[in-house]
Amino acid sequence: MSTFKKHVAAAVMAMFALFIVAVREVRAGVLETPKSGVCRQLPVIKNLTGLKGQHICNPMVAAELTRGEVKKLAATAKYPEDHLTIARFYRAQANGLDAQAAGYESASANLRNGPVVKNFTSFTTAGRLAFAAKGLREEARADRALGASHEEMAKTVVASLD
């Protein structure tokens, strides 16, 4: 048996053992199963990971509200807590967008400064990535402004209640 086949067999056995351990932990109640809507941090392997496993979530975004719920809450907000919840949501959205933009910027820099591989990317790919990063930064700036305005609204509501 070749060394490659031995390594593959060992890797398969290790993965199977990890699967069995995880199943036992779930049955014993040691490991919690993810509930619906909960983000799972799974490795994404192209063409090997199912579509549900490829869902990548942003842990910075507040999971308690969706964008639609925030818009409804913004229309009916009467209390400072409501405005602060909205501000926290927009701040988290902005942080997530900034992280995405940083990823696009680093990818753009890697393409511009890295070795050129034939037919790997177009010569305009780095520019498109930089443009996407710029758009994400502008969207993050707008979300931060919305969050700041709701914080000000919370202060004015507190001042009017006193």
Image: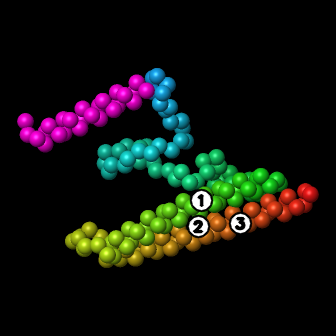
> Which is more toward the observer, 44 or 6?
6
| Vertical position of residue 144 compared to residue 74: above or below | below
Which residue corresponds to the image point at 13% horizontal and 39% vertical from the top-left? 5
User: Quarter of the image holding residue 6?
Assistant: top left
**Residue that label 3 marks:** 148
Q: Which image quarter holds the N terminus?
A: top left
Which residue corresponds to the image point at 65% horizontal and 56% vertical from the top-left? 89
| Vertical position of residue 120 compared to residue 51: above or below | below
Marks 3/1 in contact by CB < 8 Å: the verdict is: no
Q: Main secondary structure of the magenta part?
A: helix
Which comes sooner in the sequence, label 2 or label 1? Answer: 1
Q: Position of residue 105 (x, y in %)?
A: 43, 70
Label 2 residue SS:
helix
Whether the magenta-drawn stretch holds residue 8 is answered as yes
Marks 2/3 in contact by CB < 8 Å: the verdict is: no
Q: Is residue 88 left or right of residue 48?
A: right
Q: Position of residue 148 (x, y in %)?
A: 71, 66
**Amino acid type at image mark 2:** Ala
Which residue corresponds to the image point at 58% horizontal and 67% vertical from the top-left? 140
Marks 2/1 in contact by CB < 8 Å: the verdict is: yes
Label 3 residue SS:
helix
| Magenta residue span | 1-25
Spatial CA distance of label 2 from label 1 is 7 Å
Res. 36 in view: yes
Q: Which mark is residue 93?
A: 1
